[in-house]
Amino acid sequence: LFAPAATEFIDRHPQQPSPEQVELRDGLLDQPAHVDPKFLYDALGSALFTAITQLPEYYPTRCEAEIFQRHGAAIARHVGPVQAMIDLGAGDCVKAERLFASLRPRHYVPIDISADYLQSAVRRLRLSYPELQITALGQDYTHALALPADIPAAQRLFFYPGSSIGNLSPEDALAMLRRIRGQCEGGGLLVGVDRVKPAQVLEPAYDDALHLTAAFNLNLLRHVNRLLDADFDVADWRHVARFDSARSRIEMHLEALRAVRVAWPGGQREFGAGERIHTENSYKFTPQSFAALLGSAGYRDVAHWSDSRGWFSVFSARA
Ligand code: AVI
């Protein structure tokens, strides 16, 4: 009757933290603290990002759509015949779908870490494009990809829109471009990149009047609370977005409004008022700097197209 519950023994041997928990904990304990931008994208974060792309201040999505609309035929000529289009971070697949008419791929391979979101997009595409072979992959495309073996490398076009490459450090961007090239030798890459422009244009795009980007950034704390069983109070923090022109990047941070202590099982950190957690970089390129990056990664025959204001570029290159 009085035998100790089995859970008593289990509690004395707490579970090993997952690699994700270790990554979060190490970042929070670092000086200064940082959290990887992938943690911005839980279900609410993804919905907030979709809303951000509709804001008047957030120009990249509209600029890129304008480029594909105005220069679609020239882009298709440069890309050449496409057998398989591999869409990195496909999401709702809408960006790729707009190119189906001009690029005419036979096989479409959307890749997204959010497999559920991808499945519903793919169900819709199968109805609209019954001839198109679709292989949806729920993978984190920033790591090595497991692609269908029946598509020869030379028949692959990698599609990487939205300037998502700007969220990687220059070293990681170079490594990723090289890795992609290794998987499409003889094929090509079509990639969207955001351009350097005045801070008066860049900063409102990352700190909008409706505070959607602030909500997107602050929501990361709730995601961290769930993953780490931490006790961040969103009300203790504010969103900060600044353009660092020397590093050519927008930086997003969360800044403590007052001195706070944040705890999680087995650890804690005190933040002074004004202390920050770095949550995202969004690198901006010149056509020259991005062409140079593609060259360092081994691409050739590089071409690019801009929107009418020269705010965004789409690059096509052979691997
Ligand atoms: C996904 N990525 C290209 C966006 C960007 O512009 O860097 C993420 C974002 N962060 C704040 N607003 C949008």
Image (cartoon, rainbow, N blue to C red):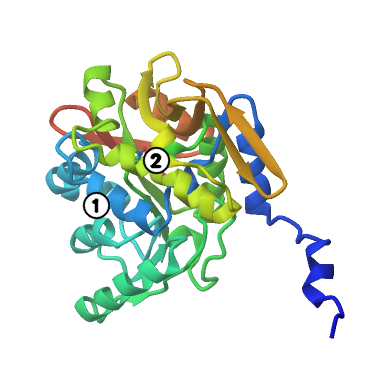
Nearer the observer, 317 or 264: 264
Q: Residue at 30% across / 55% down in the picture?
A: 47
The extreme top residue here reads 246
Label 1: element kind: helix
Horizontal and vertical percent position of residue 69: 14, 48
Q: Residue at 34% across / 60% down in the picture?
A: 91
Horizontal and vertical percent position of residue 137: 47, 68
Read off the residue under disc 1.
76
Q: CA distance from mark 2 to mark 1?
A: 40 Å
Horizontal arrangement in the rendering, residue 126 relative to residue 187 (left or right):
left
Horizontal and vertical percent position of residue 93: 29, 62
Looking at the picture, which amino acid does disc 1 mark? Ala
Q: Residue 22, can we see it?
A: yes
Horizontal arrangement in the rendering, residue 263 relative to residue 100 (left or right):
right
The response on whether ligand 1 sits within 8 Å of label 2 is: no
Read off the residue under disc 2.
218
The vertical placement of 213 against 257, above or below, is below
User: Which label sits in the foreground, 2 or 1?
Assistant: 2
Looking at the picture, which amino acid does disc 2 mark? Leu
The extreme right residue here reads 3
The vertical placement of 9 against 245, above or below, is below
Work out which quarter of the rendered image holds the N terminus and state it: bottom right
The extreme bottom residue here reads 1
* Quadrant containing ligand 1: top left
